[in-house]
Structures are given as structure tokens and as C-alpha cells.
Image: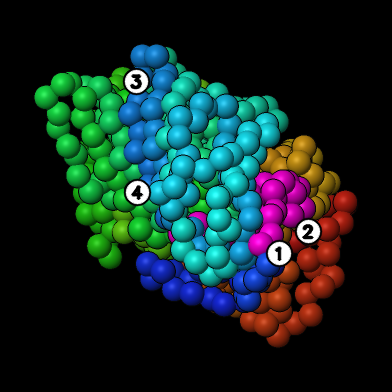
């Protein structure tokens, strides 16, 4: 997600699902005595984010959305693995009215404690058991205010968008809302004609109805963090074409988008090729953007980034490659904790500079970096230790990217790009921390890089910009 655009323990066993390496959340060895699932996962910045005691495998969301009244009627079915024997457990859910809740098909009592939905099954859920929770609900979703922008379900009067980062998913479905618990998704969304629904993954089918409402069924079959789940509803026009390596490129274009804005999307296939070469193969089968006319937010929702026409006017191709690069950094290589947000935002900001280098040459890239280094406020904040208040400040983006630029100059191109490939190969489909990246950089380089990373990631003072030899 762009900071300047408004939108926007582990299981010791590693298991395979949908071809991706997944690390579930809780320790192996299910507790035999029933416990209360924790109301948070202990994130350093958001200790109450997410919930403990289970690992969601799949979300099946069936929504009927009336755009004019901004109301939804929904049924969410969560299929989860209990990682302990659970007497009670929590979901994150904000404001919407619950009509019925069942666990394994049995109506179940629950309590609402602000945004915590506390569920009390009639019988404990057995450890290592697969179980289902089905919640029927309705209402008018209310976004949450985070820092300076609204997150979650966003109503634009004549269209709908979703930008969940960091905690907005709970505004439109019950969820284990932390990046550590990724799951596959099936979204079935019914809307009145002539609205069209765009979402993550693959459009499996469109079901036309005689009553003037159409249903769109989308499937995201690779695990996805809840902050990356998306639904966009507008009178879209679809642009679709195959690109290299069997990736399908599809864009959903809102009405009244200018030709200039559309032209800025044309290099997407070339950007894909650049990132495939610099980092590794694109992690999904589809990519594209929702291009809309509303507030200038951009969001890297998995396989289908969201861009506003205003963002394209202001930032051009840089915002296009920025959100695309998130599919590798943040989406495929996930965050183990929000404090490591520079691992996605710093990396994709550096991808912007790689695109400048490819299109305009190394000198143009250096001029851009020198301009940012000299004129960007806030770079004396260490990017690896943000607070909740500074989570999306300039340092996370630009000093994070400057760290990678300085590292490339220190290591040389061969070792630096070997590091990017090794990082992606080792952690794709899983999670990484700052410590993981530092350890791998030392492994690949054969050097002790403690002083380097201390200066760039943890010290208050911004290090000097390295010279080009």
C-alpha cells in the first residue's frame, strides 16, 4: 500500500496447500484440556490483532450487496484447523448484525465485546480437528479509521471498494485478522445490474438472474492474508489478455477513465518481466488492476491491485509497478508481524527505482534517489522499528528502499540479485522477518553485515548516501 495514497507460537510443522508453503500459527501438540483461544496473536504493534487456537484454511463468503443503500446480507463459512482443544475462541468482526451463528452446523452462543466475537461452542472443539463456523449477518458496513484514512469497506455512493490494510477486513466479514493466518477464499457476490464484481484470483463463473441481479463467483486458491482480500463493485469494463508464462492480465476499468490513465497501464507486462528477472517467477496465475475514479487510494490486493485515476495522474508508472511488486513482497512473502512492514513497502519502493533504471538508465535512477535522499522529510526514523503512528511514514518506504540501494552498492549486482532470488525462493508462500532477511544477506554475501543493517535500519541518524565508484 502507498503511504501517500488514502485507502490504503508458529506451528513447527510446515505443510503444503495449493502448492504454497504455509506456516500455521500455533505450536504443535494440541492441548488436551480445553482452553480459551487467545484474543490476539501478540503482534508487537497490534497485540490484539488476530486470534489464537486455530488456523483458518478457507473462507467461503456469500454476499448480496445493494449498492444504492450500501447494505450487505452475508453468510461467511470459515473452515479451520484447531491447534488446541478449544472451550471458546474469537473472531474479529465489526458492527454488522449477526442473524445466526453455528459451529459444525450446531447453533452456538456468542458474545460481542466491541470488535471481538467470542464464540462458546456447546462442546469443546477437539485439538487438531477441522471445524466450521458459519455466520449469517446483515447491515451497513462501517469502515474503521486508521491514522489518516478509512480502512475496510468503502462506499463511494455509486460504487464499492475495499482496502483492508491493516485491520479493515472485519468491517465486512468475520475473520482472523492478522497476516499470520492466511487462507484460500471463495467469494460469491450478488449485485444488481449493471454492476460488475471484481475480486481476488479467478472469476470462476457468472450466474445471470432473471430478477435483475447477477452473481459473480471468484476463487483465490493460493493462501491470502485477510488485509489483501478485496471486492470492488462498479460498472466496470473488462480488459483481458494473456502474457508470458501463462499469466492472465485482466483489468477492471471504471467509467470515465481517461485514455492517458489507460496508457499508464500498458507497461504492466514489461514490469512483470522485469520483476520475474530481478526476483523470481510471478507467484500467481492472474494479475491486473481495478482502475477507479474515487479518492486517491492504491492497494496491493492479491492478484488485483486497486488504483485510482488520481494516483496515476500524480505518480504515473511508479505507482503501477509499486503495487505490482507487492505481489512478490507482502503478498507472497508475507509479514510475520506488522513492525516488519518495511519488508514490503521498502522493497516495492525500490522496485519503482528498478523500473526507472530499466526505462531511463542508471543515471536517472541515481538522480531520483539523490532527490529523495536530500528532500524527503522523516528519514531519521529507523524503518525497522516503526510505531503504530509511524507505520506508513516516509522512512518505512524511502529509507527502507535506500537500505536496499546501499546494500546493492555494497554487495555488487551479482550478489545483490542473487540475494533477492534466494530471499524469494526461500520465503515465497510463507513469512519473513527482518532478522530472516539480514541472516540471508550474510549467508549469501559471506560477510558480517551487522554494522551495515544497524546503521540503515535501526539507528536514528540517516547514514550518508553511498557514492558510485
Q: Is residue 203 above or below residue 224?
A: above
Residue at the spot 25% in from the left edge and 62% down from the top edge: 246
Tell me how far mark 3 sits from mark 1, CA to CA: 43 Å
Region of the chain picked out in magenta, as a range: 34-57
User: Can you say which quadrant of the picture contains the N terminus?
Assistant: top right
| Numbered disc in front, either 4 or 2 | 4
Name the quadrant containing residue 25. Answer: bottom right
Q: Which residue is mark 2?
A: 457
| Numbered disc in front, either 4 or 1 | 4
Is 45 included in the stretch rendered in magenta?
yes
Relative to residue 450, is residue 60 drawn left or right? Answer: left
Tell me how far mark 2 sits from mark 1, CA to CA: 9 Å
Label 3: state its secondary structure. Answer: strand
Is 167 included in the stretch rendered in magenta?
no
Residue at the spot 70% in from the left edge and 85% down from the top edge: 446
Tell me how far mark 4 sits from mark 2, CA to CA: 39 Å
Q: Does label 3 or label 1 sit earlier along the sequence?
A: 3
Q: Position of residue 113 (x, y in %)?
A: 68, 34
Label 2: state its secondary structure. Answer: helix
Relative to residue 247, is residue 39 drawn left or right? Answer: right
Q: Position of residue 212 (x, y in %)?
A: 17, 21
Q: Which residue is mark 4?
A: 186
User: Few, some or many C-alpha atoms within 10 Å of disc 3 (few <14, some 14-19, many ≥20)?
Assistant: some
User: Can you say which quadrant of the picture contains the C terminus?
Assistant: bottom right
Q: Does label 3 or label 2 sit earlier along the sequence?
A: 3
Q: Which residue is mark 3?
A: 66
Q: How many marks?
A: 4
Q: Which mark is residue 434?
A: 1
Residue at the spot 64% in from the left edge and 81% down from the top edge: 444
Q: Does label 2 or label 1 sit earlier along the sequence?
A: 1
Mark 4 in CB contact with mark 2 (< 8 angstroms)? no
User: Few, some or many C-alpha atoms within 10 Å of disc 2 (few <14, some 14-19, many ≥20)?
Assistant: many
Amino acid at each position: 500500500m502507498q503511504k501517500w495514497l488514502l485507502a490504503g507460537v508458529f506451528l513447527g510443522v510446515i505443510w503444503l496447500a495449493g502448492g504454497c508453503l504455509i506456516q500455521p500459527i500455533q505450536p504443535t501438540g494440541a492441548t488436551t484440556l480445553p482452553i480459551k483461544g487467545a484474543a490476539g496473536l501478540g503482534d508487537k504493534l497490534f497485540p490484539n490483532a488476530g486470534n489464537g487456537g486455530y488456523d483458518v484454511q478457507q473462507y467461503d463468503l456469500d454476499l448480496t450487496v445493494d449498492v444504492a443503500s450500501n447494505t450487505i446480507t452475508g453468510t461467511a463459512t470459515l473452515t479451520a484447523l484447531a491447534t488446541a482443544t478449544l472451550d471458546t475462541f474469537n473472531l474479529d468482526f465489526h458492527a454488522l448484525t449477526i442473524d445466526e451463528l453455528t459451529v459444525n452446523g450446531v447453533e452456538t452462543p456468542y458474545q460481542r465485546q466491541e470488535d471481538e466475537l467470542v464464540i462458546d461452542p456447546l462442546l469443546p472443539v477437539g485439538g487438531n480437528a477441522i471445524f466450521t463456523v458459519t455466520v449469517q449477518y446483515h447491515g451497513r458496513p462501517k469502515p474503521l479509521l486508521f491514522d489518516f484514512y478509512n480502512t475496510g469497506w468503502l462506499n463511494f455512493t455509486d460504487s464499492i471498494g475495499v482496502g483492508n490494510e491493516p485491520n479493515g477486513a472485519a468491517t465486512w466479514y468475520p475473520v482472523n485478522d492478522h497476516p499470520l493466518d492466511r487462507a484460500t477464499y471463495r467469494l460469491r457476490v450478488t449485485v444488481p445490474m449493471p454492476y460488475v464484481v471484481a475480486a481476488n484470483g479467478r472469476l470462476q463463473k457468472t450466474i445471470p438472474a432473471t430478477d435483475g441481479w447477477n452473481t459473480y463467483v471468484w476463487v483465490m486458491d493460493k493462501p491470502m492474508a485477510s488485509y489483501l482480500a478485496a471486492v470492488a463493485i462498479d460498472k466496470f469494463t473488462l480488459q483481458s489478455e494473456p502474457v508470458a508464462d501463462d499469466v492472465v492480465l485482466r483489468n477492471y476499468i471504471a467509467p470515465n477513465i481517461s485514455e492517458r490513465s489507460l496508457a499508464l497501464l500498458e507497461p504492466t507486462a514489461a514490469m512483470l518481466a522485469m520483476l520475474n528477472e530481478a526476483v523470481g517467477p510471478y507467484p500467481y496465475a492472474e494479475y491486473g488492476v481495478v482502475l477507479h475514479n474515487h479518492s486517491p487510494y492504491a492497494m496491493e490486493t492479491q492478484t488485483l491491485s486497486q488504483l485510482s485515476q488520481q494516483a496515476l495522474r500524480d505518480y504515473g508508472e511508479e505507482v503501477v509497478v509499486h503495487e505490482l511488486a507487492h505481489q512478490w513482497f507482502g503478498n507472497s512473502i508475507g509479514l510475520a508481524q506488522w513492525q516488519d512492514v518495511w519488508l514490503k513497502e521498502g522493497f516495492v519502493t525500490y522496485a519503482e527505482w528498478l523500473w526507472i533504471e530499466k526505462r531511463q538508465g542508471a543515471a536517472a535512477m541515481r538522480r531520483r534517489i539523490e532527490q529523495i535522499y536530500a528532500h524527503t522529510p522523516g528519514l531519521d526514523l529507523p524503518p525497522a522499528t516503526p510505531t503504530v503512528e509511524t507505520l506508513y511514514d516516509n522512512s518505512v518506504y524511502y529509507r527502507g528502499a535506500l537500505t536496499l540501494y546501499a546494500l546493492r552498492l555494497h554487495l555488487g549486482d551479482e550478489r545483490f540479485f542473487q540475494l533477492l532470488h534466494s530471499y524469494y525462493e526461500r520465503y515465497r508462500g510463507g513469512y519473513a522477518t527482518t532478522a530472516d532477511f539480514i541472516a540471508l544477506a550474510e549467508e549469501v554475501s559471506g560477510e558480517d553485515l551487522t554494522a551495515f543493517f544497524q546503521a540503515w535500519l535501526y539507528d536514528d541518524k540517516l547514514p550518508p548516501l553511498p557514492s558510485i565508484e
